[in-house]
Amino acid sequence: MLEQLKKIDKIYDLLALCSSYIFNELDRKPYEFAQFPDDDYDNVYDAVQRYCCERQQKGCKRAFHELKDYLFSFLMPEVTVEKCFAVVKYIDELVEVEISDRLLKGKHVIEYTSMNEQYRDHVRIIPKMKGTFLERGDIQFRSIDNNEYSLFRDRRECACSILDGETINYMIWDKQHIKNYPALIYHFDKKSSVFKHFYERKQITFGIVPFTDKPIKEMLHVEYDNRAFYILNMYKGPENELKERYKDICARCEKQDIDFLIFPEMLMTENIISAIQYKEKVSSPQFIINGSIWKDYVNKSVITDGNGKEIFNYCKKEPFKFEKDNIQYKEFLRTEKNKEYTILEIEGLGRVGIGICKDLISEKVKLFHKCIGTDLLIIPAYTKSMDIQASAEDLSKQYNCVVVVANACSALGKGLKLDNRIGFITLPAKNDTDRSNILRRYNRGSCAQECEKMCVTKKFTIDFYHTRQYREGISYEIKEEWF
C-alpha cells in the first residue's frame, strides 16, 4: 500500500486507496468499527484538519504533499485496518465536498461517476447530498414553532458497503455495488441557471401530461418475435398529431412556472422532441421528462431543458409483460444497451432519478435509488394497472423519496371506469411517531371529451415551506390545478 500511496496526489484518491485496503482486509478478517478507539488517533485528525486549513494558504498540492509525508510515518511499520479507517473517518468528517470543475461537460453541467480518479473499479467516492429540499423544509418546519422534532422520520439507511454505513458526508461504494450499478451523475454547478433557480426556491411544480386518448395499436407499429414484442416505429399520422400537441403543451407551460414537465412512456419520437429545439430561451419548464422513445430495442427517456436541448437520457431496465390468447409476451429490451443508471444532482434540490413504468417494481432498480439517496423519482408510464403505487408509497414512507408517476390517458382504455387514475404523486409523511405517506392521484375526467382539441395538463405544486395536517399525517402542502 505504501508504494501505491507514493502515486497518489489527490485527497479523494487517498480516501479510495484507504477504503480499498480496508475492503481487501475485511475479506480475510472482520472488524467491528464501533470499537474504533478515536482517542488513539488524534494526530491523524490533526493532520487532516491541518491539510484543510493549509490548502487555502499553501495550495492543494503542497498541503497534500505534507499530509502524505505524515501518513508515510504514521502507517509504518505496519499498515492496519484501524490506521486506514482513521484516515477514512477524518477525511469524511473534515474535508468539504468539492466536485472538480475539470469534469465540466458544458453549460456548467458536470458529468461524473465518482470523485476519485484512481481505483474506480474497486471503490467509488460519491458525496452525500446536503441542503436538499427535504432538509430545507425540515429546517423551516422546526424554526416556525420551535419544534423539537423533525418533520419526517429519518430516511432508512441503505449502505453501499460496510464502510458506507460508517461515513457522514461521503458514500463509499464497493466493487459489487459498482458492478451492479454503473452510475453516471449530472451535477449542476453554482454558476448554472438551474442552481440559481432552485437554490432559493420554496416549492417544486410538476406538469403531468396524459398526452393522448388514442389506443396504442393505432399509434405504434408493434411486432412480435415468438414470445417477445418490440416497437418498429410510430405511425406518421399520430406522430404529427402528437408533435403539434407537444408544441402546444410546452408553449402553455412557459406561463405556468413548471419545474418538471412529464410525459408518458413510449409516446415520444426524436421528431416530436425536435419540435421545440432552437427556441429562444424560456424560463419554464426547467426540465422536460420526455416520456420515452422505443427504438432499436431500447426504451429510452430523454431529459431536455425547456429549449429542447438534451441533458441526459435513461434506458428502461424492467421489461413490460402481458398476456394475449393465453401466451405471455415480454418487451424485447437489449440488456447490453441499458445497463447504466443516471442521476440529476441539483444543489438546493437534491438527487433526481428517472425510471420507466415497471422499473418502479424492480427490486434491483429500487435498491439503486435507496443506495444513491434519490430525493425525487420521476416515472413516465404506460399502464392500466396501478400495482406500481405500492412501491412508490414504500419509497416515500421508508426513504423520504417523492415519487411522481405520469401515465397516458389511453392506457386506461375507452370509457370512464370506476378507477380512472391516470397517475399519482406520493410524499413522505409522519403520523405521530409512525412513518406514513401522502398519496395524491389525478384522474381522467371530462377533459377526455376535449382531447381532440388539446391535452389538459395536471399541475402539482409541493410547497416545502408550508406543512399541512392530513388524515394520513403531517407533510408538505400540495396544491393542484389543471391548465
Image (spheres, helix red, strand yellow):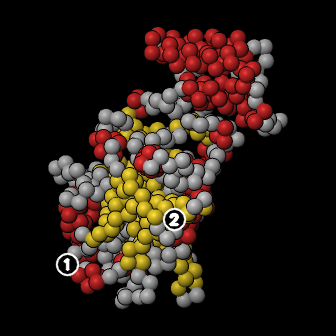
| Image coordinates for residue 181, horizontal then vertical, percent | 58, 49
Could you tell me which secondary element the residue under label 2 belongs to? loop
Q: Which quadrant holds the C terminus?
A: bottom left
Q: Report, in whole angstroms, how far the alpha carbon at label 2 lies from the one at label 1.
A: 40 Å
Q: Nearer the viewer, residue 309 or 464?
A: 464
Horizontal side, residue 44 vs residue 343: left or right: right
Residue 473's tag is 2
Q: Up-down: is 187 above or below 22?
A: below
**Extreme residue toward the left, this view:** 280
Q: Residue at x 51, y 53 (%)?
A: 151
**Extreme residue toward the front, this view:** 145
**Amino acid at the residue labelled 2:** Gly
Residue 453's tag is 1
Q: Residue at x 53, y 79 (%)?
A: 322
Answer whether labels 2 and 1 touch (C-beta < 8 Å). Answer: no
Q: Residue at x 41, y 28 (%)?
A: 102
Q: Residue at x 42, y 78 (%)?
A: 421
**Amino acid at the residue labelled 1:** Lys
Q: Up-down: is 476 above or below 482?
A: above
| Image coordinates for residue 356, horizontal then vertical, percent | 46, 63
- Counting residues from the start of the chain, the first of labels 2 and 1 encountered is 1
Horizontal side, residue 374 vs residue 172: left or right: left
Q: Residues within 10 Å of mark 2 (few under 14, many from 20)?
A: some
Q: Which quadrant holds the N terminus?
A: top right
Q: In this view of the protein, can residue 278 be seen by the observer? A: no
